[in-house]
Image (cartoon, rainbow, N blue to C red):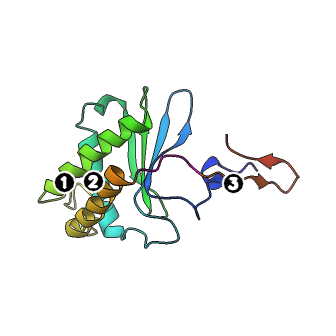
């Protein structure tokens, strides 16, 4: 079995920032890395759930709303994935994310947190969400990272897999 691209990233050197995780013919997957994997605590599930609701709401109402395919958390809880169509650069996503984070910091409630609108409506934490977003905003504005450090992996059959 082939190694998937995201497993070729050296997570011991990955810094908070915005990265192109995958680029296909039609879609670009952006890695919005909020915390430093394996060095900082992951985002608490309740805060990440609130980030997801707020970020999805903002992006799906933004100037690029027609290009947004998916906004959702990483399983490791260190960041978010945003899948887009169209032509968007890392710098475009940085600008959009900064605008989104500033908006999140102004919110007084998380949208869609009722039993009818959310599958786990009690798992939200707006204050912790805003704390994580403020820290991420500071990082995007003052210490921006956008280039992955790649691993080279040798498969069991001897083939070398390295994502270019």
Q: Position of residue 73 (x, y in %)?
A: 41, 56
Residue ID at (36%, 69%): 45
Q: Which residue position is annotated with label 1? A: 111
Q: Which residue position is annotated with label 2? A: 53
Q: Are marks 2 and 3 in contact (CB under 8 Å)?
A: no
Count residues near mark 3 (Cα–Cα under 10 Å), then give few for <14, some for 14-19, many for 20+. some
Tell me the number on the disc at residue 144.
none
Q: Position of residue 157 (x, y in %)?
A: 88, 53
Count residues near mark 2 (Cα–Cα under 10 Å), then give few for <14, some for 14-19, many for 20+. some
- Stretch of the chain drawn in magenta: 144-148
Q: Secondary structure at mark 3?
A: loop
Q: Are marks 1 and 2 in contact (CB under 8 Å)?
A: yes
For the residues carrying marks 2 and 3, which lies nearer the camera in this image? 3
Residue 157 placement, left or right of 78: right
Q: Secondary structure at mark 2?
A: helix
Q: Which residue position is annotated with label 3? A: 151
The image shows residue 5, relative to residue 27, as above or below, that is: below
Q: Is residue 132 magenta?
A: no
Q: Position of residue 86 (x, y in %)?
A: 42, 26
The residues tagged by marks 1 and 2 sit, at their Cα atoms, a distance apart of 6 Å
- Single out the residue that lies furthest toward the front: 142
Residue ID at (49%, 32%): 27
Count residues near mark 1 (Cα–Cα under 10 Å), then give few for <14, some for 14-19, many for 20+. some
N-terminal of the pair, mark 2 or mark 3, is: 2
The residues tagged by marks 1 and 3 sit, at their Cα atoms, a distance apart of 39 Å
| Front one among 116 and 121 | 121
Q: Which is the main secondary structure of the residues drawn in magenta?
A: loop
Residue ID at (68%, 43%): 163
Q: Secondary structure at mark 1?
A: loop
């Amino acid at each position: 079995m082939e190694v998937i691209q995201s497993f070729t990233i050296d997570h011991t050197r990955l810094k908070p920032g915005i990265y192109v995780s995958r680029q296909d013919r039609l879609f670009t997957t952006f890695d919005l890395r909020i915390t430093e994997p394996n060095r900082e605590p992951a985002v608490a599930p309740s805060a990440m759930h609130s980030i997801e609701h707020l970020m999805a709401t903002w992006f799906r109402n933004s100037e690029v709303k027609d290009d947004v395919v998916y906004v959702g958390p990483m399983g490791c809880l260190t960041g978010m994935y945003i899948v887009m169509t169209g032509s968007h650069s890392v710098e475009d996503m940085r600008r959009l994310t900064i605008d989104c984070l500033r908006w999140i910091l102004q919110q007084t409630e998380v949208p869609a947190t009722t039993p009818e609108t959310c599958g786990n409506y009690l798992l939200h934490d707006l204050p912790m969400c805003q704390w994580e977003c403020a820290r991420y905003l500071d990082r995007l504005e003052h210490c921006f990272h956008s280039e992955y450090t790649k691993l080279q992996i040798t498969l069991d059959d001897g083939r070398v897999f390295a994502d270019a």
